[in-house]
Image (cartoon, helix red, strand yellow):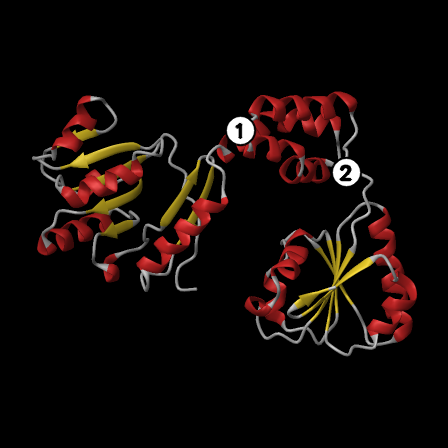
């Protein structure tokens, strides 16, 4: 990566836009979705920006622009439409230590604006480091179709319940939220029955028992010599991303291991059959506790015979392009 993806807090922080024309207006439309204190530096404003200032959705600064204008800002966007002025404004902003984006001038950008899928507070940003913005928009369109319009309201509902969940299910919060986002509550939201989702969550909190808490999930066994995760099946990818515990053979390509959650427990598997047998027994114990377990191994691994002997009927095999 040449640019690190991250989210910048905007609450009670200034964001400065230099320019009052169409390019600046486009940046304002994007930034107006945040709670930042937006300052527009320009003598003349487009009708849309003038309306925004009149409605106190932004403030206007029409005085001489010095480096002081850019002090203590979260971000600065320079969009005057005049390349020479943009360069001069960039120098002033950088002298104030600001993070700067200059419209249509990538060499002068500390940051770029991605394509955004907005289900506030669920935000998905898609970037191509400026190489293929049309591709980013196409990906955005696909993701928009995958997510229900009211998904953000479910996320907000969950956020408001965190303290109560921590109290009712100490140490089992992940299992509770897995139920919320995989089972009845999210399905109710997808159908537009938000009150039913709330009732379902309240019933589980009152009962103090997670419906799927004791469910024994099949151990996902991924047999692959892929040199990248893009060649795995979708089910294998989902298995890795959902796993709480992952057992890994040493011959597995490192690129595959970019997929699991950072907090998933990773356990190496040695080549010795004695060690493998013990580790498979550990995997079965994790499974009995309701945790999701994945095993990643190379094709034709001797581990296959150990698995058949100890975990027959308790696993799902993923062979590169197929699952069985």
196 sits to left or right of 72: right
User: Alpha carbon of mark 2 to alpha carbon of mark 1: how far?
Assistant: 23 Å
In terms of image quadrants, where is residue 320?
Answer: bottom right
Quadrant containing the C terminus is bottom right
In terms of image quadrants, where is residue 316?
Answer: bottom right
Look at mark 2 in the image and give the residue it sits on. 212
Residue 179, x across and y down, in percent: 69, 37
Q: What residue lies at 40% left-to-right and 50% top-to-bottom? A: 140
145 sits to left or right of 214: left
Closer to the eye: label 2 or 1: 1
Q: Please say whether residue 222 is visible from this viewpoint.
A: yes
- SS at mark 2? loop
Q: Nearer the viewer, residue 68 or 187?
A: 187
Residue 321, x across and y down, in percent: 64, 69
Which of the labelled discs sits on residue 41, or is there none?
none
| Up-down relation of residue 52 to residue 131 (above or below) | above
125 sits to left or right of 257: left
Q: What residue lies at 62% left-to-right and 23% top-to-bottom? A: 196
Q: What residue lies at 78% left-to-right and 25% top-to-bottom? A: 208
Quadrant containing the N terminus is bottom left
Q: What residue lies at 46% left-to-right and 35% top-to-bottom? A: 149
- SS at mark 1? loop
5 sits to left or right of 103: right
Q: Nearer the viewer, residue 272 or 108?
A: 272
Residue 267, x across and y down, in percent: 76, 62
Look at mark 1 in the image and give the residue it sits on. 192
């Amino acid at each position: 990566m040449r640019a690190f993806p991250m989210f910048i807090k905007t609450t009670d922080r200034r964001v400065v836009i230099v320019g009052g024309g169409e390019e600046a207006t486009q940046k304002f439309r994007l930034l107006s979705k945040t709670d930042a204190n937006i300052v527009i530096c320009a003598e003349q404003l487009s009708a849309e920006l003038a309306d925004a200032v009149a409605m106190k959705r932004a403030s206007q600064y029409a005085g001489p622009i010095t480096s002081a204008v850019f002090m203590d800002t979260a971000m600065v966007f320079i969009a005057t439409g005049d390349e020479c002025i943009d360069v001069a404004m960039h120098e002033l902003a950088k002298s104030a230590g600001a993070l700067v984006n200059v419209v249509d001038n990538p060499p002068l950008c500390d940051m770029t604006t991605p394509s955004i899928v907005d289900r506030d507070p669920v935000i998905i940003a898609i970037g191509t480091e400026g190489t293929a913005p049309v591709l980013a928009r196409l990906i955005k369109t696909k993701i928009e179709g995958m997510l229900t319009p009211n998904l953000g309201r479910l996320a907000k509902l969950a956020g408001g319940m965190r303290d109560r969940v921590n109290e009712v299910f100490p140490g089992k919060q992940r299992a509770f939220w897995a139920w919320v986002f995989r089972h009845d509550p999210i399905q109710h939201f997808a159908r537009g029955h938000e009150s039913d989702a709330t009732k379902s969550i309240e019933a589980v909190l009152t009962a103090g028992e997670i419906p799927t808490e004791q469910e024994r999930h099949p151990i996902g066994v991924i047999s692959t010599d892929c040199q990248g995760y893009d060649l795995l099946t979708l089910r294998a990818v989902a298995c890795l991303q959902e796993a709480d515990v992952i057992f890994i053979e040493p011959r597995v390509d490192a690129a595959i291991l970019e997929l699991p959650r950072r907090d998933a427990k990773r356990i190496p598997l040695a080549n010795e059959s004695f060690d493998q047998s013990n580790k498979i027994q550990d995997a079965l114990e994790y499974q009995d506790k309701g945790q999701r377990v994945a095993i990643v191994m190379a094709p034709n691994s001797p581990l296959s015979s150990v698995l058949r002997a100890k975990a027959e009927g308790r696993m799902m095999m993923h062979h590169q392009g197929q699952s069985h």
